[in-house]
């Protein structure tokens, strides 16, 4: 019998080839055929990943590619372990749904031959990164992912100005990430004499530390951690929505997979400061990300910053887990690592919903600025429901996946015995504070995103004339939304499965589908029981309400209370900018918004006021303080270097002569 | 199983009956101290009954949020009461009143109110919603941290277990960790339930109102649910705080004698705490809106100190 994992991996290659071939079909059927092929490829990856997660291993699929000078290289091997299986399943599910969404959504350049072929290559890359068993196949898949996403991002470059600079930022940072990882792997290969993961596990200091620094820098860039998050808020808004959903929900997770690969599989006994680095990076990203997200009014930019926040939380959880394992509290450490995986899975689920929902809004209204949306719940009920569920997941409200994941993380924090260990006694309260602040601000952010976009009255003509999305788009959003709630309802069996990937044993299923953290005492969470309790409380409320409604039915009036306001004009409504204005005041120091108020007067009568224009721009502090000065310095260096080249043949000849002299001097010694 | 269901039923019924009375006592205390006669302690009950006999209105273009947000707020408050150890510390087997579950149920109600404020589409609704969520965003960290500090010595985050453990050991109450956390918690309760100096529940002044601004467009039974649901939150949080501070009298099980003692003790504790709150309110003015975050940041610092201290003291 053929090995199922090998078969699954081969089938993914098959689906990608079909997807690329389908991109050549005429435009009428291209979306449907290519999208379906990629979607099936994603499902195959999900199935393969789940089989691998349950503990099966493949025989190791060796790619028949001969590399030049391949003496020191091991063969290209695809063999996902349990951790890889988890990330492969996650990526597969996300890509399957985003490709399905793309069938209805892709239009213009994103639906071109290049667009779909790039998506197919990108999808294969993301799915194979966690399957790689050696450095070269990892880098190949990683580069397929990077190039595919760059091409997808460029799709609309002809129609929108902002696409090109966004792609430039993305391309530079994604390749910086690639180079750092390449350097890290290079160090390890040189020290061990091979590229297979298994050869590296016995390496020791200082090689591991050098590799750790290089690899973590590379993976953090891909994951979008602060301060290398700057590509996220630029690339996500400009990419076509199915691509930004796949990038945010699946691709950045490969950065997380990389961090786990280094710290769990390659060097599981790293020093404590590695974990502290993770906690520091994660906590800073979580706080900064959510703070920025809370004041954005561009819906997709908001979601992009929220990705930085979530990735920050995941990294924090990994850091706490490693820290606890390092100080001998293995049981609690395992729980924190399971929390990290749950956070990753829940983020994948709700970010798929939110980005596809934002895409559906953009498709229907032509707007992604929250200040121009409104009243969409009545016009796009399915999108509104799905987006609402996704927003609840992002705000970690019960009973969604996000809530379960944060619950597990907080339980790990609360059950740590930090009295004996000064490092823990310092790190854990700070972590708790950061998580708590993040939860609060996340709530505000997503109430704003949902409330301003979908409730009240439309603030623009585009929102006024919005229509519900097409069938495949709605189906993709709803499946992802059901997944978000489903993962929140059955945490028990799911967490046990995930526990296997990080070697956590003491997770038990309790009650209906609840989760019991056996190693921490009888700590349990049973969302289904909580839902039943809620239903029991809802019944009398509904009964009383129904009796009251029978006696006094609701009446529709033109102007309910009005408060002297004119209901037909939406200008009196609060919008996203005004909603977050109090926060801008409270956190003014770290947000740095630019505001301008301009009084518009007629030319001949400067004392008459025609209108007042208010403009507020949020800027990225890290970008202003770190990147822009660095870019300016580079440009100055470039200007200086340009002086060396004045086009005169004499100067070039003198350069050659000088070079020759230097060579002669060196050789003669 | 049956015992814990009885406890849940007792909690909910007790709180629903007591809450309008609590509000009545608070309003009367305040009125008497200010030299008014006041509407009497039963006035909140009369208000609620009156509201349920009125016809609610809706504006064109309003959605299901208008109808469902009040019901959701009420339900979340009831679930909150089922989980908080008001009378007895016997928890439900599968839903053990875990700190984080309780906080998130509280947040569900907060979100329902905020969405209702936005749904009205008026400037007031949005303004109230925005301010409400800003307070919530700053309050939640303090709630989590202060109860986290209290739960560290006990080793569990189940509120019932924390209250039970505190009633057995005086040393867990009279120590710096506990006092810091409780002070932080009191500030949080005041902010979360919209009392002075954060929000004035009896004003309709445009510049200052928060809670009232969100429910401005609601009427009839919608307003009834909103008022009742918000009052229940006050009872739950006040009850939780007094039971953490003065945990005696709370029943350890569902035996009827203990429940009777628990009911009497909780009634007295909650009403006294409410009267003190109302009496203090007479002497303070509402803070400027952008002073409130400073107060909340102060409470966050207290809670944080309390967590740090708990690692050193125990």
Image (cartoon, helix red, strand yellow):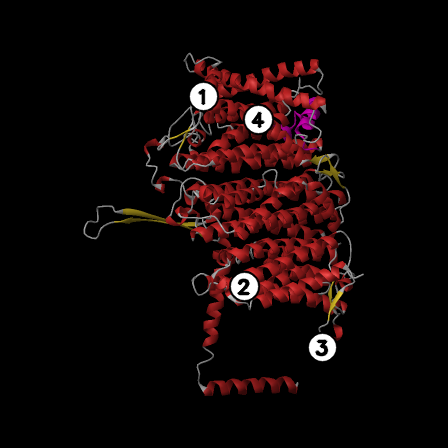
Q: Chain of mark 3?
A: A
Element type at mark 1: helix
Q: Is any atom of residue A476 visible in this view? A: yes
Check if mark 3's residue and mark 2's residue have beta carbons within 8 Å: no
Please tell me which residue is depicted at 49% across the width and 13% down the height of the picture.
B42
- Whether B161 is among the magenta residues is yes
* Residue annotated with mark 2: A30
Element type at mark 2: helix
Q: Chain of mark 1?
A: B
Q: Is residue A18 above or below residue A568?
A: below
Residue A220 in the image: state x and y as whole percent.
61, 57
* Residue annotated with mark 1: B51
Q: From mark 3 to mark 4, how far is it between C-alphas?
A: 70 Å
In primary-sequence order, the first of circles 3 and 2 is 2
| Nearer to us in this view, A634 or A157 | A157
* Residue annotated with mark 3: A69
Q: Is residue B79 above or below residue A333?
A: above
Q: Is residue A280 above or below residue B223?
A: below
The image quadrant of residue B207 is top left
Q: Give the magenta range.
A: B156-179
Check if mark 4's residue and mark 2's residue have beta carbons within 8 Å: no
- Crowd rating for badge 3 (residues with CA inside 10 Å; few <14, some 14–19, many 20+): few
Left or right of A125? Residue A230 is: left
Q: Looking at the figure, which quarter contains the N terminus of chain A?
A: bottom right
- Crowd rating for badge 4 (residues with CA inside 10 Å; few <14, some 14–19, many 20+): many
- Whether A120 is among the magenta residues is no
**Residue at the extreme right:** A1
From the viewer's perspective, is the residue at label 1 or at label 3 nearer? 1
From the viewer's perspective, is the residue at label 4 or at label 2 nearer? 2
Q: Chain of mark 2?
A: A
């Amino acid at each position: 019998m053929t090995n199922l994992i090998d078969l699954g991996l081969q089938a993914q290659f098959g689906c990608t080839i079909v997807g690329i071939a389908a991109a050549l079909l005429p435009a009428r059927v291209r979306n449907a055929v290519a999208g379906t092929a990629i979607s099936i490829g994603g499902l195959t990856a999900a199935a393969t990943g789940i089989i691998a997660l349950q503990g099966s291993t493949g025989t190791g699929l060796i790619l028949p590619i001969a590399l030049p000078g391949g003496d020191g290289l091991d063969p290209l091997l695809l063999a996902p372990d349990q951790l890889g299986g988890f990330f492969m399943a996650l990526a597969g599910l996300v890509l399957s749904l985003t490709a399905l969404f793309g069938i209805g959504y892709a239009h213009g350049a994103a639906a071109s031959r290049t667009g779909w072929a790039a998506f197919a290559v990108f999808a294969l890359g993301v799915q194979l990164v966690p399957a790689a068993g050696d450095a070269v196949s990892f880098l190949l898949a990683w580069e397929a992912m990077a190039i595919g996403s760059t091409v997808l991002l460029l799709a609309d470059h002809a129609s929108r100005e902002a696409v090109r600079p966004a792609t430039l930022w993305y391309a530079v940072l994604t390749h910086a990430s690639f180079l750092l990882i390449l350097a890290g792997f290079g160090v390890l290969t040189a020290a061990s004499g091979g590229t297979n993961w298994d050869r590296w596990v016995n390496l020791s200091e200082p090689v591991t530390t050098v590799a750790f620094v290089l690899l973590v820098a590379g993976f953090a860039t891909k994951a979008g951690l602060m301060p290398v998050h700057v590509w996220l808020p630029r690339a996500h808004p400009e990419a076509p929505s199915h691509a930004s959903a796949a990038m945010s929900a699946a691709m950045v997770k490969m950065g997380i997979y990389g961090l786990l690969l280094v710290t769990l599989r390659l060097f599981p006994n790293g020093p404590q400061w590695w974990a502290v680095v993770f906690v520091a990076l994660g906590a800073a990203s979580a706080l900064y990300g959510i703070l920025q997200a809370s004041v954005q009014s561009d819906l997709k930019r908001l979601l992009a910053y929220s990705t930085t926040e979530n990735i920050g939380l995941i990294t924090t959880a990994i850091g706490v887990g490693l820290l606890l394992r390092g100080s001998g509290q293995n049981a609690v450490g395992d729980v924190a690592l399971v929390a990290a995986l749950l956070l990753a899975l829940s983020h994948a689920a709700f970010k798929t919903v939110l980005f596809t929902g934002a895409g559906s809004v953009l498709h229907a209204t032509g707007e992604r600025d929250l200040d121009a949306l409104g009243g969409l719940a009545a016009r796009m009920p399915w999108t509104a429901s799905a987006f609402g569920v996704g927003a609840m997941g992002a705000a970690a409200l019960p009973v969604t996946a996000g809530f379960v994941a944060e619950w597990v993380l907080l339980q790990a924090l609360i059950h740590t015995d930090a009295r004996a260990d000064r490092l823990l006694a310092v790190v854990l309260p700070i972590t708790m504070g950061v998580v708590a602040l993040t939860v609060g601000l996340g709530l505000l952010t997503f109430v704003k995103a949902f409330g301003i976009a979908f409730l009240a009255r439309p603030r623009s003509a585009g929102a006024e004339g919005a229509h519900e999305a097409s069938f495949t788009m709605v189906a993709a959003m709803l499946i992802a939304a059901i997944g978000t709630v489903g993962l929140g309802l059955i945490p028990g069996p799911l967490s046990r499965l995930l526990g296997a990937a990080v070697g956590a044993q003491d997770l038990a299923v309790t009650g209906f589908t609840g989760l019991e953290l056996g190693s921490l005492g009888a700590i349990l969470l049973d969302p289904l029981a909580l839902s039943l309790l809620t239903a029991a409380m809802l019944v009398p409320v509904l009964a009383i309400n129904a009796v009251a409604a029978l006696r006094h039915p609701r009446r529709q009036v033109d102007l309910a209370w009005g408060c002297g306001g004119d209901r037909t004009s939406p200008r009196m409504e609060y919008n996203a900018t005004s909603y977050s204005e109090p926060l801008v005041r409270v956190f003014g120091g770290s947000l740095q918004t630019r505001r301008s108020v301009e009084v518009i007067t007629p030319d001949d009568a400067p004392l008459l006021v025609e209108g007042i224009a208010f403009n507020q721009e949020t800027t990225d502090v890290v970008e202003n303080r770190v990147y822009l000065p660095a870019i300016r310095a580079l440009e100055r260096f470039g200007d200086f270097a340009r002086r060396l080249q004045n086009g005169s043949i004499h100067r070039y000849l003198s350069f050659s002569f000088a070079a020759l002299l230097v060579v002669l001097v060196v050789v003669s010694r | 199983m049956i015992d814990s269901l009885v406890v849940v039923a007792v909690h909910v019924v007790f709180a629903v009956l007591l809450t309008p009375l609590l509000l009545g006592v608070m309003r009367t205390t305040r009125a008497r101290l200010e030299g008014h006669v006041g509407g009497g302690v039963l006035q909140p009950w009369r208000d609620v009954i009156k509201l349920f006999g009125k016809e609610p209105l809706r504006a064109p273009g309003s959605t299901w949020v208008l109808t469902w947000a009040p019901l959701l707020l009420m339900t979340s408050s009831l679930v909150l009461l089922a989980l908080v150890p008001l009378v007895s510390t016997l928890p439900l087997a599968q839903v053990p009143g875990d700190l984080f579950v309780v906080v998130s149920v509280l947040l569900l109600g907060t979100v329902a109110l905020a969405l209702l404020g936005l749904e009205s589409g008026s400037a007031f609704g949005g303004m109230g919603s925005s301010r409400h969520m800003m307070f919530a965003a700053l309050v939640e960290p303090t709630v989590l941290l202060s109860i986290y500090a209290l739960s560290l010595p006990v080793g569990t985050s189940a509120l019932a277990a924390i209250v039970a453990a505190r009633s057995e050991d005086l040393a867990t109450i009279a120590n710096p960790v506990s006092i810091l956390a409780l002070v932080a918690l009191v500030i949080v309760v005041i902010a979360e339930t919209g009392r002075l100096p954060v929000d004035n529940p009896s004003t309709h002044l445009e510049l200052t109102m928060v809670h009232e601004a969100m429910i401005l467009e609601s009427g009839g039974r919608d307003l009834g649910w909103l008022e009742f649901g918000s009052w229940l939150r006050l009872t739950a949080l006040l009850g939780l705080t007094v039971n953490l501070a003065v945990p005696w009298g709370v029943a350890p099980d569902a035996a009827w004698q203990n429940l009777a003692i628990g009911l009497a003790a909780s009634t007295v504790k909650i009403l006294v705490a409410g009267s003190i709150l109302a009496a203090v309110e007479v002497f303070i003015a509402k803070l400027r809106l952008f002073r409130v975050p400073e107060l909340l940041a102060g409470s966050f610092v207290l809670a944080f100190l309390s967590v740090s201290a708990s690692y050193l003291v125990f």
